[in-house]
Image: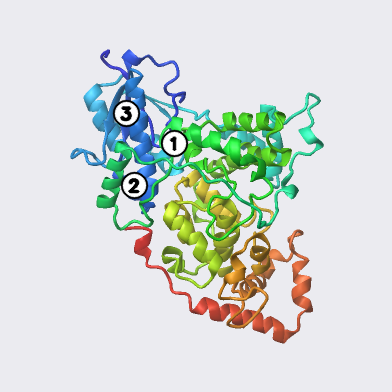
Amino acid sequence: MASNPILVPILGDQLTRTLASLRGRTKDDTVILMMEVWDEATYVKHHKQKITLIFSAMRHFADELSDAGWSVDYVKLTDPDNSGSFTGEVARAAERHDPRAIHIVEAGEWRVQQQIEEWPDKFACEVEVLPDDRFLCSHAEFKDWAEDRKHLTMEHFYREMRRKTGLLMNDDGKPKGGEWNLDKLNREPPKEEMNPPPVPNFDPDEITREIMDLVADQFRDHFGDLEPFRWPVTRDDAEKAADAFFAQRIEKFGPYQDAMVHGSDDMYHSMLSTSINLGLLDPLELCERAEKAYEDGAAPLNSVEGFIRQLIGWREYIRGFYWLKMPGLASDNKLNAQRALPEFFWTGETDMRCLSDCIRSTREDAHAHHIQRLMVLGNFCLLAGINPREVQDWYLIVYADAYEWVELPNVSAMILYADGGELATKPYAASGNYINKMSDYCKECRYSVSKKTGEDACPFNPLYWHFMDRHRDRLASNHRIGRIYSNWDRMDNAKKQAYLDSAQGFLDQLEPADKSWARG
């Protein structure tokens, strides 16, 4: 190894062999630094499987780099000299290796990026921060796109990304099939004849088992089950998971992507978000595979377009929105929601069958699919007026694919409307009717979805009108939902009061969560 090498710190969600900080580097003049640090594992009390996933993937990636001839300086969490922070570990590495420069790809999270931006003043060597070009849209590009727009509509952004990539585009610049967005074809409720194939499980190897023992010992009071652990932790296994999706599930992914079935946690979803967000899989490569599946006749256009939209549309848009709106987005609370998160979000002990099942899946697997997160768990938090900071913490903690850049805007702006409508054109509020239509949850629930008020009524029914009534001044002028108030106004006063009293009675009996679940 040459003296005064380039030091390349790689963060836990940057596990990509083609990372910008590695491209153009020579192995005899580079030291790669990877760090397991307490600050990141404990700033919220992450799900046990999430910590296991990230640390195991990091160790496997470090081994792959070492096997390929790179010099890797890996700091384990249990290293007695571990400072506990990224900055502290870079400082220690700088003492060990005396680098002439530090090259790092920008962080995914605003909090970590603030630390990195202090490094030029802390270290004697040059610090170069590189853009994360694993994303299609840079921060500057998104800012330029958003400038002077009254509404930051995702659909408009998505079309720009389609043009930029050429995905599902004809030579004349028009979308294949004649339409940009086929979401209207992707709202099928569950059918009895559905039989989703099982998602591949990846048995823990020796490295993962070592991490699981560490997590069981050091993070025993964190939320979630540690076993069974089934996530891919290497690129090879992530590719196998992708192969299984394209071979077995993409065909029906589109129509049933919003469907929910009790006990069926994966449905036809790809289950690739953990691998994508770690950096093990390239989103653009996955989109190209999806497009090829359509061209080969292996998947319908609506399934392929829906999958591609999630990656180059929503995922890219959410990241751009996050960086455009931070740090204010983290404290937004335009609806003044102040209620504490209920204890049952941690225990799952509720008679509401939909919520109980979604929380069970979350506890067991650190996973729930997007409609469960938005229209069951999120819808409840919106209607009940749960404090955004507590909801943000919960989502960040419990899901294995959750990083602040993707979790915060989805929760604060999309689910809770806490930004006042800059992202979503309307609150995603729904009564029990939506859940009944898109799931089998209501059939065996203790509550009756057909009852609107009273102790046996589905709580979503009165909570919906309670929410609409208390936010009328803000929402009545919204062109997408303003007409709903005509229905409210046609009700007699006794019916209105019954809705409000039923909702308030339900809210009053909610037990607030012990805050030690989220933060130590």
Q: Which mark is residue 107?
A: 1
Q: Residue at x 47, y 54 (%)?
A: 395
Q: Residue at x 60, y 57 (%)?
A: 260
Residues under numbered marks 1 and 3 in contact, where contact means CB atoms less than 8 Å apart: no
Q: Which residue is disc 3 drawn over?
A: 33
Say which element carries label 2.
helix
Q: Is residue 183 above or below residue 359?
A: above
Q: Amino acid at mark 3?
A: Leu
Quote the CA–CA distance across marks 1 and 3.
15 Å
Mark 1 or 2, closer to the camera? 2
Q: Residues within 10 Å of mark 1 (few under 14, many from 20)?
A: many
Quote the CA–CA distance across marks 3 and 2.
18 Å
Quarter residue 143 falls in: top right
Quarter residue 113 falls in: top left
Q: Is residue 107 above or below residue 185?
A: above
Mark before the other along the chain sequence, 1 or 3: 3
Residue 479 at x, y percent in the picture:
77, 59
Q: Which residue is disc 2 drawn over?
A: 41
Q: Amino acid at mark 1?
A: Ala
Q: Which of 377/31 is in front?
A: 377
Check the picture and name the quadrant holding the C terminus.
bottom left
Mark 1 or 3, closer to the camera? 3
Q: Residue at x 57, y 38 (%)?
A: 245
Quarter residue 104 falls in: top left
Q: Amino acid at mark 2?
A: Ala
Mark before the other along the chain sequence, 1 or 2: 2
